[in-house]
Image (tube, coloured by chain):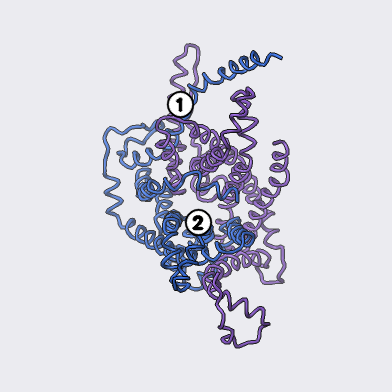
Chain colours: A blue, B purple
Amino acid sequence: MSAAPTVAARRSRRDRLDRPMKVILPMWIIGTVIFVLFPIYLIFMVSFAPGSALFGERPSLFITEPTTMWWQRVLESGDLWAPLGKSLTVATLTTLLAIVIASPAAYVISRLSPGLRYTIVIGLLVTRMFPEFAIGISVATRFARFGLVDDYVGLILAHLIGSLPFIAWILVGTFETVPRELEEAAQIDGASRVGTLTRVVFPLAAPGIAVASLFVWLYSWNEFLYARLLTTNQNTLPLQVFTAIDRGSAQQMATVAAILTLPILLVVYFLQRYLRPGALSGAVKG
Amino acid sequence: MAVEEGVAGAASARPSPARRGWIARHRFELLLITPLVGYVLVLTIAPILDTVRLSFSDPDGAGFPSLQSYREVVGTDVFRTAVVNTIIVALLSLSMELSVGLAIALALHTKFRGRGLVRTVSLIPLGVPTIVSGAIMLLIFNRSGFLNSLLFSVADLINNIPGVDWEYRAIGWTVAGGVKSLFVVAFADMWKVLPVVTLIFLAGLQSIPEDVYEAADVDGATKWQRFVRITLPLLIPYFTMALILRAIDAFRIFELALVLAGGIEPVLGTYIFSRYAPPTNDPYTAAAASIVLFGIIMLFIVLYLRFVARRAEMVA
């Protein structure tokens, strides 16, 4: 039995794949970065492009004479500040309410037996399998009757529908990491149930709650479908982008889109360390 | 869990002792969980049931279980086109997202200088609003868009070769209709959700223990064999998760289809919206179509789990 030569032969076969990979891999990585960044570059580039740059069948990839004309025009027009204010208000209030409603419940769910816990969490996620329209059609017709169309309250209620199952799912995972022994210790020391929660459990879960609430804020800030169903004339910022797509110039569209995107790029930048792949593995194994 | 006794007297009715005991003991927990449960019941479950009821109601008010709206919907060409288009877009975007996402995850899993930065950069589309990615794709795929500009340059390059004469004509990709428009929608969806798919696959790759590969090395496995025999089979659960998560969203696609193929190629999302919104103002057929959409999503997931996932696990 001569094992040595075959191993050597196999080694050389492996090398054959090694060499092309040394070229392909860096190119693929650079290609990925370009693929991801180019569209972002485009939206900001176009928002500074003079009108003449985009005419014809061959628009240029670079602008030689940038202009702030479109930004000035959009910032000075009456169509920006009201939608911006509505989007900010709705996203912030949705986030606050989502935390208030979901975190106590998530705490209780996290303390249930594993079987019951998974049933509830999966049940919450199943509601996400329904088309938003299946919920939205009924909600929109009812809300219209209660005068909740073009109303902050109506949109906040609708955005809670989309975000509560999600935030509850994340927070159940967060509260699972808070050891029960700490609660018991606090109660032995004479803390009430409420005191244990507010002084021990919630402070320990604060980082998780912060991340979850950022996700909810992002969801509400970007949300289009419910906003479209529940709006006739008080646009949110995403609806304003759609209006610009519908009847604005390319630059105007790009400028409004850039304004909608800017805060989000900052948020994702600060969030990215929480978006480690490991954060998801628990969910997959579950 | 702390036991709170001595509140039994507060209950005025006469439930059975065991039941009263349970409620009394868990009053605190019930209090905490009620807002969420109440919200989901009133503003998620009830609306879904209401939409189901609406879809089976006769618009003229005659008789409750009525298939009138379903018959009306299925009878139109627009609806049938929308169903076919939805399936095409979903399959296109799923296959592109999963293959490209896997390829990016594999690259980001290798060790190289600046990996942290590249990983951060590759997450950026996650934060870009869907409607904005639609706007960007319009800039790229328009008649006077950047894809045409690129293709003109390619044509110029090729035409430098003697004997080649290729005249490229600008195409308005988004208004071309047919598979071209659907491809643009699927492409936009892919760009937007690649980070999610990549993260799921990265999690999968990191879950594979190093010693499995070491054992394969001892046995003299080639890189290709390692990939096909170890990496791919062990990624199957993550593949299933990514596929189901993405399939739910891909079939429900709305904003991107509205912006990029709005007037030309309907998908179920835009069809439902056009039924509901003015000037049609018909919640009955809109409800029926959204129940059909839910049925398609469920059917896809059940078929996948029943046939593909099980067979893949058997092969592995």
The disc, 1 or 2, on the residue closer to the chain's N-terminal end is: 1
Say which amino acid is labelled 1.
Pro
Q: Nearer the viewer, residue A202 or B2?
A: B2
- Disc 2: which chain? A
Residue sitting at the far top: B162
Q: Which mark is residue A26?
A: 1
**Rendered position, A78 above or below B117:** below
| Dot 2: element | loop
Say which amino acid is labelled 2.
Thr
Q: Identify residue for label 2.
A: A177
Question: How far is the residue under mark 1 from the one under mark 2?
Answer: 39 Å
**Rendered position, B86 above or below A214:** above
Residue A203: x and y in percent read 41, 62
| Dot 1: element | helix
Q: Quadrant of residue A49?
A: top left
Residue A179: x and y in percent read 50, 59
Horizontally, residue A257 falls left or right of residue B223, namely left
- Which of pointers 1 and 2 indicates the residue nearer the eye? 2
Residue B311: x and y in percent read 73, 40
Q: Residue at x 52, y 66 (%)?
A: A105
Horizontally, residue B231 falls left or right of residue A168, namely right
Q: Is residue B212 visible?
A: yes
Q: Nearer the viewer, residue A179 or A190?
A: A190
Residue B163: x and y in percent read 50, 12
Q: Residue at x 57, y 46 (%)?
A: B246
Number of residues whose C-alpha sits closer than 10 Å to that of mark 2, classed few (under 14), some (14–19) or many (20 or more): few
